[in-house]
Amino acid sequence: MLDCPVDQVPDGREFVEAAMRWHFDPQTGSPFWLKRAENLDFDPLTDVHTFADLRLFPNVVNEFRDVRVEDLVPKGYGSRPEVIGVFESGGTTGPPKLVVLLADWMDRLMHHHNRLMDEHGYPRVANWLSLGPSGPHIFGELIRQQVRRRGGFRFSVDLDPRWVKKLISENRLDEAGRYAEHLIDQSAYALRTQDIGVLVTTPPLLVRLSRRDELVALINEKVRVIVWAGAHLDPDTRALLRDEVFPDVKIIGNYGSTMIMGSVSERTGLDDDDPCVFDPFSPYISFSVVDPETRREVPYGERGQVVMHHLSKNLLLPNNLERDTALRVQPPPGQLGDAVADVAPLAVFEDERVIEGVY
């Protein structure tokens, strides 16, 4: 069940049960979860059967801040698992959290992304320009893997979002702005000299690009798809960029995090008046939208806090309460969890002020 072909969607209940057997069998589970199971007040092998049962798990994400990465790899992969890399969260509210991404999960995720990119009309064998962190966040690796599978060349402008957040937290706003403009200067060179078909960046940097008439003209002339990710984009700015600034380019959102080891794409077929909806990559990546006080789902159409779940052969990480709010939306038929729309950051998370910066 956990190794089903990448183009198949396993049954939700059978998949959840298979994942519990894998992650909590002493022969296949990771040292982290085998040890953590000793302190659970339920038995994952007998008590967890459905998506709703994942609520039994405590939110253990903060324990990923100082875990040995070797302890996160399930024993069932053997002594030499094919590791793509170790990736970290943004460290916005304390030391960063860690995940280990393995090759079989990357293949499954990229197959899903490729299908959605075809549905959205991304070009194949096109050059990509990425303005985002190369690491330790997962952002850069995902872009590298996408270009590798679709053809073309990848141009990148690296950014350090933690440095920007530090500057903002210290009220050094002029320095943060100069750094952001430095990133735009670097992207300008690639846009002027190369045939760029896909531009990937964050909303704050996309807004800065839109302030330079020369770059707006180059993007409308050359680029077929703009992908935004890594920070929120409010509906009014999204509409302005789509309808007035870049009318000749498709603008498509992605939403995810390092801690779910991936992202999901904006729903295809949305009308201009629809909110930006993100569907889960069920049953592997799923969302719940909850009241932060009761942890119960809010009604469809209402705003709540996002809970992310990752469930695969590579990793088990359920019930991660994220620093985002979103509207709860009905998912496509057969999908586990919720779809989310109009994602926005909380002002305060875990008693820390949330600084979004440029990523």
Image (tube, rainbow, N blue to C red):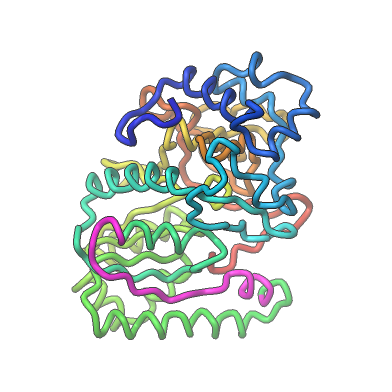
**Could you say where residue 285 lies in the image, as x and y percent from the top left?**
49, 37
Is 196 displayed left or right of 46 in the figure?
left
Q: Give the range drawn in magenta.
A: 148-167
Is 113 displayed left or right of 260 in the figure?
left
Tell me the residue at 30%/34% (across/down). 7
**Could you say where residue 117 lies in the image, as x and y percent from the top left?**
27, 49
Quarter holding residue 165:
bottom right
Tell me the residue at 49%/68% (across/down). 134
264 part of magenta stretch? no
Q: Nearer the viewer, residue 191 or 169?
A: 191
Q: Nearer the viewer, residue 71 or 197?
A: 71
Tell me the residue at 62%/60% (across/down). 90
For the C terminus, the image quarter is bottom right
Is 311 displayed left or right of 227 in the figure?
right
155 part of magenta stretch? yes
Tell me the residue at 59%/32% (across/down). 28
**Could you say where residue 59 lies in the image, as x and y percent from the top left?**
70, 37
For the N terminus, the image quarter is top left
**Could you say where residue 160 lies in the image, as x and y percent from the top left?**
57, 73
